[in-house]
Amino acid sequence: MAEPGGPPRLDFPAPGRATITLARPAQLNRLHREDLRILQAHCATLAADATLRVVVLQAEGRLFCAGFNLDELGSGGSATADDPQLFERTVDALEALPVPTVARLHGGVYGGATDLALACDFRVGEAGLQLRMPAARIGLHYYPGGLQRYVSRLGLAAAKRLFLLAETVEAATLRSIGYLDAVVATDALDAEVERLAAALGDGAPLALSGMKQSLNEVASGRADAAVLAARVQCCATSSDLQEGLAAWAERRAPRFVGR
């Protein structure tokens, strides 16, 4: 009999690299209240790690995640009766990580898991991947942060298609609407995730972090000109920029330190 698994794991497989692994394969990695709180704790740990360069979100078992555990659905349509914003704040914490994030998607992505993956900066899916957002079929009005994320990243038409029709969408369509950044054969999934993670890890940390935040703020209409200008100035006076320019001139790989 399959093991029931447990809450999401946080691992550090290499310097500057972290992985968050959904670890309830026997339950199709459905997210429990406990899982959401632990995901928030993992995000707090990662946000405080100055050596971190990239995070990969992945899952065990035959599919990525079947969404929130509906057995814990609260009264009145709240995903968590004791904390109605628990799921929303968890996804927001993942999105707010200062380093780039990559979601490794396989099998299926359903319900709230679609937003969890969308909060990552990049999503790589296998060719057989399926996605479905069934909120309309169970009478659930999705939380505002998720709706905003869908519209800002995929556009209004794609968001309406996924939310209102609640249809199952295949990998090729997910690539065409921008949900997936790459679709690869199952046996190439790990290599493509590694390629992206390595490329992100080679970037200048200050520039990557600053531009990630700025791009998300611009997309959501929250950009502040003074804040963006401060980030530009921070990079302009950084040691990393001097190192990057020197490496460019000397035709060598730069050695960034995040300062």
Image: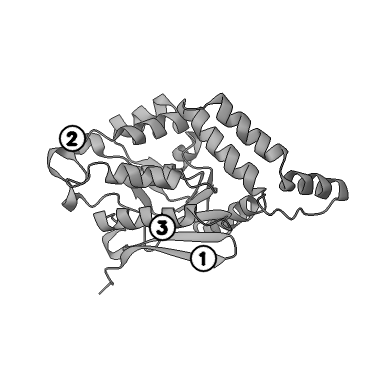
Q: Residues within 10 Å of mark 1 (few under 14, many from 20)?
A: few
Q: Residue at x 51, y 55 (%)?
A: 55
Which mark is first along the chain, 3 or 2? 3
Kind of residue indicated by mark 3? His
Q: What is the distance, in whole Å, between disc 2 and disc 1 at their CAs? A: 40 Å
Instruction: Tell me if residue 145 comes above or below residue 18 in the rendering.
Output: above
Q: Is residue 187 visible?
A: no
| Relative horizontal placement of residue 134, taking residue 183 as reference (left or right) | left
Say which quarter of the image contains residue 131. Answer: top left
User: What's the coloring here?
Assistant: one colour
Q: Residue at x 48, y 47 (%)?
A: 97
Residue 224: x and y in percent read 52, 26
Q: Quadrant of the N terminus?
A: bottom left
Kind of residue indicated by mark 2? Gly
Nearer to the camera, 125 or 45: 45
Q: Residue at x 34, y 27 (%)?
A: 160
| Residue at far right of view | 250
Q: Which numbered tag is attached to residue 139? A: 2
Kind of residue indicated by mark 1? Phe
Instruction: Tell me if residue 130 comes above or below residue 173 in the rendering.
Output: below
Q: Regarding mark 2 in the picture, which secondary structure is present there?
A: loop
Q: Regarding mark 3 in the picture, which secondary structure is present there?
A: helix
Q: Regarding mark 1 in the picture, which secondary structure is present there?
A: strand
Q: What is the distance, in whole Å, between disc 3 and disc 1 at their CAs? A: 12 Å
| Relative horizontal placement of residue 145, taking residue 224 as reference (left or right) | left
> In this rendering, which labeled residue sits more in front, label 2 or label 3?
3
Which mark is first along the chain, 1 or 3? 1
Which mark is first along the chain, 1 or 2? 1
Q: Which numbered tag is attached to residue 12? A: 1
Q: Which numbered tag is attached to residue 42? A: 3
